[in-house]
Image (spheres, rainbow, N blue to C red):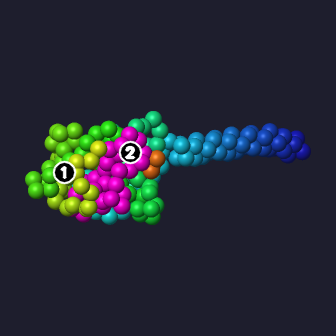
Amino acid sequence: MPEKEAKAASAAKTAPGISRWLFDWTEAVAFAMLFVLLIFTFALHTNTVVGRSMLPTLENGDLLLVSRLFWTPKDGDIVIISKSSFREEPIVKRVIATGGETVDIDFEKHEVFVNGEKLDEPYINEPTERELGMTFPQTVPEGYVFVMGDNRNESDDSRDPALGMVDEGYLQGKVVFRYWPFRKFGKIE
């Protein structure tokens, strides 16, 4: 009999240890999930590239991590724009100019200028030939940005009056990282 009583006493001591362990793990997982939810709600979000307008920098289907916090658009940033009056799905473009800057495009020489200086654009797919209806030069109003795709001749962007200058309120954030496809995993410049 004493052997059975010892086993029962041991089992009674073990049961609270297992429940405590299970509670601790459940609590840790819940806090981790809450932390991830808060990060992806307020600081980061993901986006998928749709189309060819950002070739060669980004390809159709690339999965991106986008920063929402502590960010002010600046020339050269790749941004996500959500303007449903232009397109239902968010679009990905590069900021060419910000508020107060003047953009000029010479379509004969295929050159883009900001404040009279020709842009060095090693990221573009081919020289800018496609006119989309906007006349140049254009000065970007404060609180707006002028955006273009890196694949200039297959990009609907700020050259198109339907999109035009983009109010910064339509910017979802700055693209900071590509996480798929894995062979191109890394920071986006």
Label 1, residues with CA under 10 Å away: few <14, some 14-19, many ≥20: many
Locate the N terminus and report the quarter of the image it occupies.
top right
Return the mark for residue 144. Answer: 2
Q: Residue drawn 84% across and 40% down? A: 9
Label 1 to label 2: alpha-carbon separation: 18 Å
Q: Is residue 141 magenta?
A: yes
Amino acid type of the residue that numbered disc 2 sits on in the rendered structure: Tyr
Which quarter of the picture shows residue 189? top left
**Residue named by callout 1:** 105
- The count of marks equals 2
Highlighted range, magenta: 140-168
Residue 51 percent coordinates (x, y): 32, 64
Q: Going 38% across and 45% down the picture, which residue do you hit?
A: 144
Q: For residue 104, say whether it is visible.
A: yes
Disc 1 marks which amino acid? Answer: Ile
Q: Is residue 127 magenta?
A: no
Query: In the displayed structure, would residue 89 be above or below residue 12?
Result: below
- Report whether 17 appears left or right of 12: left
Farthest residue, direction left: 109
Determine the secondary structure under disc 1.
strand
